[in-house]
Amino acid sequence: MENHDGRSWPPFYHVKENARAKRVILRVRPETGLVLTVPKGFNPRHIPRILHHHRDWIEKALAGIEDRCRTFRRPDILPQSIFLKAVNTTWAVVYGPGSVKTLELTWTHRPPRLQLQGDVSQVPACCRLLRRWLREEAKRVLTPWVHVVARRTGLSWARVRITTPQTRWGSYSSRGTVSLNAALLFLPPELVEMVIIHELCHSRHSRHDSAFWRLLARHQPDYAQLDAALKHAQDHLPLWYLASFMSKP
């Protein structure tokens, strides 16, 4: 069955079961397509009815994603330079010939310079290599940053873990692991500092209860304004970084 644009219906979709989900949640993203998050024990026989009920929204969202995916494959989104606002550093990006079958990324810190060699027409693959570099650079920068903040505040931690999730800036585990998003390097330093302090405060209070907010306010008096700014922090992420999450063809 097709819709008026010639696309088949129902579209391809993934189903994810989540024990904490209270209802069915629909999301459409370039890297995953249509995803239905369902409560544990959900009867899949209800899915066709849900898709039909949300058909207009799904079709518009998928059309928008198709446009975005085309953008993410354009060679001109590959950066000539990368500005890391958190540390006020600009990295030059140089592209050169290499093996047709492989891509290789190397870098130096003095001066800050990235060399990407190979078939740069593989735009998402190039972006994934750049994201891998960003993670390594974040390990180098954010790990000592946590040390400094922890020493200043007296808050504890066991280890620092750098990841590249798409939906959260940081977390703190029951074992004392501070997990930080490498993309924090794109944000202003005051927002990075706030995220680090926020996660370290969980070493004393695991929940966001009144005691947690009092502790955060003691170490970060303007946390409310910074937290509001953090809600728009996705605006700091460059197109090449967003393109790096596209699934491989």
Image (spheres, rainbow, N blue to C red):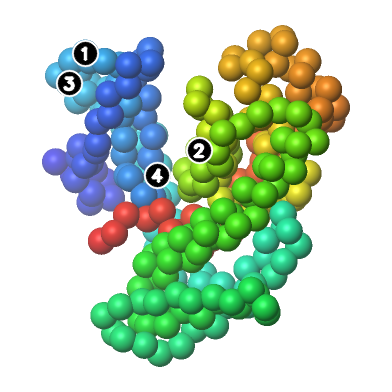
Of mark 4 and mark 2, the one earlier in the sequence is 4
Residue 29: give its label.
Answer: 4
For label 2, the SS is: loop
Q: Can you identify the residue that label 3 sits on?
A: 44
Q: CA distance from mark 4 to mark 3?
A: 21 Å
- Asked if 81 appears above or below 193 in the picture, the reply is below
**Which residue corresponds to the image point at 52% horizontal and 47% vertical from the top-left?**
162
Q: Is residue 16 left or right of residue 219?
A: left
Badge 3: how crowded within 10 Å, few (<14), some, or many (20+)?
A: few
Of circles 3 and 2, which is in front? 2
Nearer to us in this view, 141 or 128? 141
**Which residue corresponds to the image point at 21% horizontal and 13% vertical from the top-left?**
41
Q: CA distance from mark 1 to mark 4?
A: 25 Å
Q: CA distance from mark 3 to mark 2?
A: 26 Å
- Mark 2 belongs to which amino acid? Thr
Q: Is residue 41 left or right of residue 146?
A: left
Q: Write down the quadrant of residue 201 in the picture.
A: top right
Asked whether residue 69 is in view, the answer is yes
- Asked if 142 appears above or below 109 in the picture, the reply is above
Of mark 1 and mark 2, the one earlier in the sequence is 1
**Which residue corresponds to the image point at 28% horizontal and 29% vertical from the top-left?**
16
Of mark 3 and mark 2, the one earlier in the sequence is 3
Of mark 4 and mark 3, the one earlier in the sequence is 4
Q: Can you identify the residue that label 1 sits on?
A: 41
Q: Can you identify the residue that label 2 sits on?
A: 167
Residue sitting at the far top: 210
Q: Write down the quadrant of residue 239 in the picture.
A: bottom right
Badge 2: how crowded within 10 Å, few (<14), some, or many (20+)?
A: few
